[in-house]
Amino acid sequence: MVKSRAEIQREYRQRLKEKNNEAYLKKERERRKKNYAPSSLLPRKERLKRNMKNKKYLRRYRRRLREQAAIDAAVENDESILNSSGYESTNTSHEQVTPLMVRMSFPNRRNGSRRRVSRAVATAK
């Protein structure tokens, strides 16, 4: 079976990645930076495509961070359980108890209609 140029290039990059990862990553970053086009210059369809791709990568990255934080918290929790006897009080100091402060925001109701009218005027223009 004959491979296309894209398949050959993809396999070549994969081999480079496996062989010399740090140098490959540095070179790949420079290549991507050189070929970068600002989104303001892209057509709408390509810009939306790029945004969706970036959104997917960012979602994956944040999920990885959350998973790592959960693992770190679990390890820290296990260590604290091992270091305690189980009879300690949660509040060991009886010095001063701070009251619970709850902050509730009640927006100014007088501005509600003003905002609604200004939005309507702005969209009508």
Image (cartoon, rainbow, N blue to C red):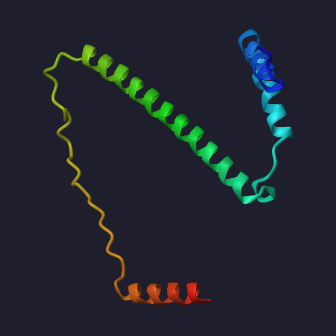
Q: Is residue 38 above or below residue 69?
A: below
**Front-most of residues 11 and 72:** 11
Where residue 4 sits, quadrant-wise, is top right
What residue occupies the far right of the structure in this picture?
34
Name the image quarter holding the C terminus: bottom right
**Front-most of residues 8 and 16:** 8
**Front-most of residues 112 and 125:** 125
Name the image quarter holding the N terminus: top right
Where residue 92 sits, quadrant-wise, is top left
Q: In the rendered view, does 98 fall on the left or right side of 58?
A: left
Q: Is residue 116 above or below residue 26?
A: below
- For image coordinates 27% across by 15% down, the residue present is 83
Q: In the rendered view, does 68 fall on the left or right side of 47?
A: left
Q: In the rendered view, does 115 fall on the left or right side of 76?
A: right
Task: Estimate the x, y position of residue 5 in percent, counting from the top left.
Answer: 84, 24
- For image coordinates 51% across by 87% down, the residue present is 120
What residue occupies the far front of the structure in this picture?
1
What residue occupies the far left of the structure in this picture?
87
- For image coordinates 68% across by 47% down, the residue present is 50
**Front-most of residues 26 and 125:** 125
Task: Estimate the x, y position of residue 73 in percent, counting from the top left.
Answer: 37, 27
Where residue 106 sits, quadrant-wise, is bottom left
Task: Estimate the x, y position of residue 65 in percent, counting from the top left.
Answer: 49, 32
Q: How many marks?
A: 0
Task: Estimate the x, y position of residue 23 in percent, counting from the top left.
Answer: 80, 18
